[in-house]
Amino acid sequence: MTVTVLGSGTSTGVPIIGCPCEVCQSNDPHDKRLRASILLTGTKHVLIDSGPDLRQQALRAGVTQIAGVLYTHFHFDHLDGLPDLRPFTFEKTANLTCFANEQTYKKIREKYSYIRERAQHSNVPHLSLDLFEGSEEKGYAAFSIAGLTIQPIRLVHIPTAGVLSTGFVINKTFGYLTDFKTIHPDDEKYLFNLKALFLGSPIDREHVSHIQHSEALALIEKFAPLRGLVGHLSHQYSHNELCELWQGRAEPAFDGLEMEF
Ligand SMILES: [Zn+2]
Ligand SMILES: [Zn+2]
Ligand SMILES: [Zn+2]
C-alpha cells in the first residue's frame, strides 16, 4: 500500500491568511500545509477525511476515483470538503462509502442532510454513510476496503466537550491518530511496533483539544514505530526548525510525503 500525506496543516492551514510570520512567509514548499488528510492506496484509493482543501488536494495528487472515506471526526477541517466528493460519483457505477463513529455519523447527517446513496439529481453527492462496526464502549471491529484492513482506534479529542475522534491502523502497519488528547487504553495494543505512526500535534504548548509536541514525542517513544511522524502542524515552527528540534526522534510531516509499505 501507499500512504500519501495530502495535508499536514492545522485547521487554519499554513500560511494563515494575512499572517506576516516567518513560517507563513516561508518559500520552502515543506511549509505550505493544507488541512489534514491522508490518501491510502490499496487496490483503489481511500481517503482519511475530506477537509476544505479536498478539491485542490485531489487535483494535485491526480486522484480520479475513490472507494471510500474514513472519517476521524466532524470538525470542519476534516469534513467540509464533503460536497467536493461529488465528482467521484459522476460515474453511475461508482460506489463511494464513508465510515464514521456514531457521533460523527449524526453530525454528517445533520449538516449534509441532502446526501443520498442513490440520488435522483446529479447535483447531489451519491454517498453511502456507514457506522464502524462495534461501539465506543466495547470497541470497533476491523473491516476491509480496497484490499486494506482498517482497525478503528477510539480517541477523545475534547474531553471537556465530549468530542470523540477515531484513529486508524491500516494493515497493522500504518497508524494515523490526528486530533486527540487521549487514546482508549484498550486500543493501545494496536499501536505498538508499527512501521509508521502518524500523530497530530499542532504546537508545543498545552492545548485543550490536542496533544502538544512533547506528548507526541513521548508516545512515539512508547509505541516504538520504525518511523514516527507528526502532522496537523501550525505556523509555530518551520519544517527545518522541527527537524532541528526533534533530531530524528520524530519527523515533521509535509504535504506530498509518500510512504510505501
Ligand atoms: Zn483538525
Ligand atoms: Zn504565521
Ligand atoms: Zn478536530
Image (cartoon, rainbow, N blue to C red):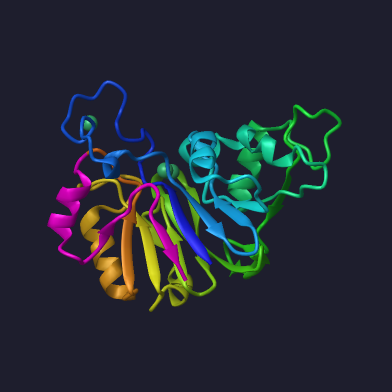
Q: Position of residue 223 (x, y in %)?
A: 34, 74
Q: Is residue 236 left or right of residue 158?
A: left
Q: Position of residue 67 (x, y in %)?
A: 68, 53
At 38% across and 47% down in the image, what residue appears? 255
Residue stretch in magenta: 236-261
**The image quarter in which residue 191 lies:** bottom left
Residue 204 visible in rendering: no
Q: Residue furthest front?
A: 62
Q: Nearer the viewer, residue 234 or 59?
A: 59
Q: Position of residue 167 (x, y in %)?
A: 48, 59
Q: Is residue 213 left or right of residue 209?
A: left
At 50% across and 63% down in the image, what residue appears? 2
Q: Position of residue 193 (x, y in %)?
A: 38, 79
**Within the magenta stretch, is there residue 251?**
yes
157 vs 216: above or below: above
Q: Nearer the viewer, residue 58 or 189?
A: 58
68 vs 56: above or below: below
At 54% across and 35% down in the image, what residue appears? 55
Q: Nearer the viewer, residue 71 or 138?
A: 71
At 20% across and 47% down in the image, what residue appears? 205
**Within the magenta stretch, is there residue 48?**
no
Tell me which image quadrant ligand 3 sits in: top left
